[in-house]
Image: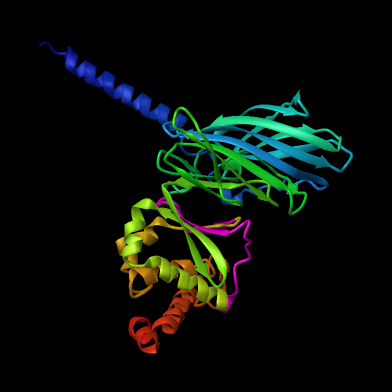
Amino acid sequence: MGRGLRSPLSAGCGALALCLLLAGAALWICQPFFDRSPVNWMEVEEPDYTLEGVYLTGTELTVDASDTLRGRVSGAGVYHIENTTGQAQKLHFSVNAGYTVDAATLNGQPLSMTDSGADYIAMRDWSCTIPAQREITLELTYHGSPKLWNVSTDLSGCVVSGEYVDLSGGHLAPAPELEVKGEDTPVTLNVTLPGDLTPVTSGREAKLVSVQDDGTRIWSAGDTGEGAMLLMAGDYVKTELDGGGMSIEFYYSRKHQAQLEAIDAISAMEAAVAYCTEHYGPRSFTADKPFKIIQGTEFLFGGFAKYNVSAILEDSFTVKNMEDRDKGASGAEVLAHEIIHQWWGLGVMFLDLEDPDWTSEGMTTYSTYRLMEELYGEDYARTFYLDKW
């Protein structure tokens, strides 16, 4: 082969390499997973768009999260609004950065929506102008795949998959920047999910409405005094934790059921609830809006408390965590420790800059020790807690 001539194989490899580089560049530019929040996001002052004299008097959400193959959400929100100002107002909505508002109507007439085009912590601002009239019904339709915050180093955030769904606030549906009219302000949710996922929502317990021909299921739920809702769905098993006269709904993955039954974890968790209720006071929840503790996924960064829902990380149920003798002498005691976090850390957060030894983790560990002392005696608590420390 003469000099200056390239083999077909060499030319083909070069073309393939170029294609891969171009494809990589296109994926980098058009990637659908993370938002485009500014790198200096901590220096950005997020505006408060909440309007004075304009109130949300009711919300009706219809959401379809059954397209788990594409991780896609679609739906509609109907917002009942009272404008007491006597003037036209600019109303803002907080919407996940991956969603597009398709159409809007105000009292049945088409309404123009404006996309700010700027992402901030996985959210984007959409806005419209509402008229001076007092009673307003605004309807939005939307669709998209939820995006994650680009600063995040893991997959923590909103999720739509075949095994798990986690959506709340503006990640579930466009959320207006309005105060609710009062504690009785209703919000309802009708959500379509894959047939093998059981929903847990803020507010009242979700009820099955119908089973569709394609196997998906429609559920209904609701709340009062809120303008938005939280939705989590998975292969959940529900049990009631009864302690101190306060019923708590505990939802955990079915794959952990045998594990929890083997160590009698539910009894230990109920003892933790009873102890904390007696010594620190009951959590402020009612029978129609019960306290719900949910097992989150491994990708959920930290626990959280929002609305009447609190979450425990999935890694709390791992063998490694349950064998952490700094938290308890057994797996059941470790889970009791995690329940006590519902009072210290999620109920009350410690932040004493002058005395950093006072922490939520410290109070939780101390409370676990006192609980075990009460249950099993001083010698047991000294052996497995004080001597260990």
Q: Tell whether position 244 is magenta.
A: no
Furthest-bottom residue in this view: 379
Q: How many marks?
A: 0
Residue 328: horizontal and vertical position, in percent? 37, 74
Left or right: residue 121 compared with residue 179: left
- In the depicted view, which residue is nearer to us: 214 or 4? 214
- Residue range (magenta): 279-306
- Check the image and report above or below for 143 versus 276: above
Does the magenta portion include 295? yes
Residue in the picture at 62% in, 62% down: 285
Q: Residue furthest right?
A: 86
Residue 96 is at least partly visible in this image: no
Residue 228: x and y, percent?
64, 46
Residue found at x 69% / y 41%: 59
What sort of colour scheme is used for the picture?
rainbow
Q: Residue at x 60, y 38 (%)?
A: 173
Quadrant for the C terminus in the image = bottom left
Q: Magenta stretch: dominant SS? A: loop
Q: Quadrant of the N terminus?
A: top left
Can you tell which quarter of the image residue 62 is in? top right
Q: Is residue 200 above or below residue 142?
A: below
Q: Is residue 37 above or below residue 292?
A: above
The front one of 59 and 257 is 257
Name the foreground residue: 190 vs 313: 190
- Classify residue 389 as left or right of residue 130: left
Q: Is residue 227 visible?
A: yes
Q: Position of residue 224 (x, y in %)?
A: 69, 51
Q: Residue at x 67, y 31 (%)?
A: 140
